[in-house]
Image (cartoon, helix red, strand yellow):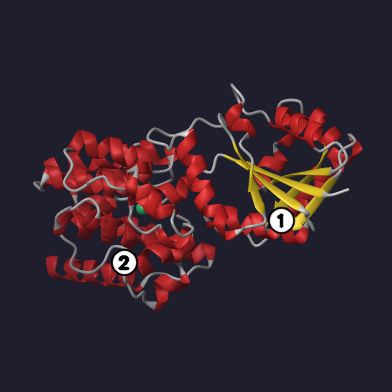
Amino acid sequence: MARIGIYGGTFNPPHIGHIHAAQQAFALLKLDKLLLIPDRIAPHKVLPAGSATADQRLQMLKIAAAQIPYAQIDDCELRREGTSYTYLTVQELKERYPNDELIEIMGTDMFLSFRTWRNPEMIWSKATLAVLCRGDKDEKSAILAEKEVLETLGAKVEVVPNEVTAISSTNLRRMLAFDCAAAYLPDGVLQYIRENGLYGANENYRQLPMKRLEEVVISLIDPKRVNHVLGCRDTAVMLAKHWGADETDAARAGILHDITKALRGPLQLTLCDAYGIVLDDFSTKYPKTLHALTGSLVAERIFGENKAVVEAIRHHTTGKADMTLLEKIIYVADYMEPCRDFPGVEKLRELAITDIDAALKLGLEMTLELLKKQGSEVSPASRDALLWLSGKDRCKC
Ligand code: FE
Ligand code: FE
């Protein structure tokens, strides 16, 4: 009896995270055969606009799979009409391999939601479930608890420790737009993407008109941040009007300020690496704060924004000494836009209209206080900003 792994997915596009997971699954599950199965229509997600067609995803998977010659691409879901339910695939494969053990491979999220899939009992009656687990403590205990539940229901579950490469297809599409995805794509896939103009890889985003800029930004940021970003833009424009700064610059910096925020720490570092940026000690230690720097790089190199906009994005999390009016406005707008709700925000909103420096100072002080509570280090740039503002205060006396 052979052990046949089933590794399904949308592969939109296939990336090295998929390849590494397939390699680990093959070795650790001691598989005799591994089937890569691209879906036709994924049951749990709607593909974003501009995605590759099913045939293009298949072609890219063929290129990617050249790195794992023992894997076999199976197009059974592409040939089947309608939604690509796993239970139908497992049923079909069981008919094809009646005497072998089928092993349905999945990541943690899929495993934890497995009982909500269509006909889960049909799947576990015909296949062992294998979950690739990153091994962080919380995730492991959630997986073990779910394993117990599923086993009580009659499923056979294998947990595979896995060094998952930190990339998702969604983030990979962002990295493509930011021109720094090469490290995450198997040889040939990036070339295919460029040759076929997929995922906006060949699009020119430089100096887009405002409406188009808004559409592009919304397509690239975390959907949960859309209201924040639009709120920051509108607030920045209001403050620019009030204080006499350039309203267009304020709008563009406001909408772009968190453009790279969805990228997790390692991806921030990859972006810096791809752009040839050498980081200081603080940024290397706290990659979470890097989205201001990477956002400014993307604003400059991908969106072709002017220096004032780029610098306002660059300093929106920490501030710095000698901030321009636009830099102050973006810092404060980010802090007080309408979605913000925390003790002190009303005071900040008042000050933003009466004394922008005082609003900036209050924002910096509140951040410092929060960092202190969290036991995190304060950025040297924020200290410089506060010293600079205190100096200005003294000058007023
Ligand atoms: Fe931010
Ligand atoms: Fe923000």
What residue occupies the far top of the structure in this picture? 82
> Circle 2 sits on which residue?
275
In screen coordinates, is 376 left or right of 246? right
As drawn, 367 above or below 94:
below
Estimate the x, y position of residue 119 in percent, counting from the top left: 76, 26
Q: Position of residue 114 (x, y in %)?
A: 72, 36
Callout 2 crowding tier (Cα within 10 Å): few <14, some 14–19, many ≥20: some
Mark 2 or 1: the one toward you: 1
Q: Is residue 2 left or right of residue 11?
A: right
Residue 176 in the image: state x and y as whole percent: 37, 51
Q: Is residue 258 visible?
A: no
Q: Which residue is mark 1?
A: 25
- Whether residue 350 is visible, yes or no, is yes
In terms of secondary structure, where does tag 1 sit? helix
176 up-or-down from 379: above or below: above
Identify the residue shown where x is 49% and y is 58%.
186
Given the image, on which type of amino acid does mark 1 rest? Answer: Ala
| Cα gap from disc 2 to disc 1, whole angstroms | 33 Å
> Where residue 263 appears, x then y in whole percent?
44, 54
| Residue lying at 8% horizontally and 46% vertically, measured from the top left | 244
Residue at horizontal 23 percent and vertical 46 percent from the top: 205
Q: In the depicted view, which residue is nearer to us: 357 or 135?
A: 135
Which element type, helix, strand or loop, lies under badge 2? Answer: loop
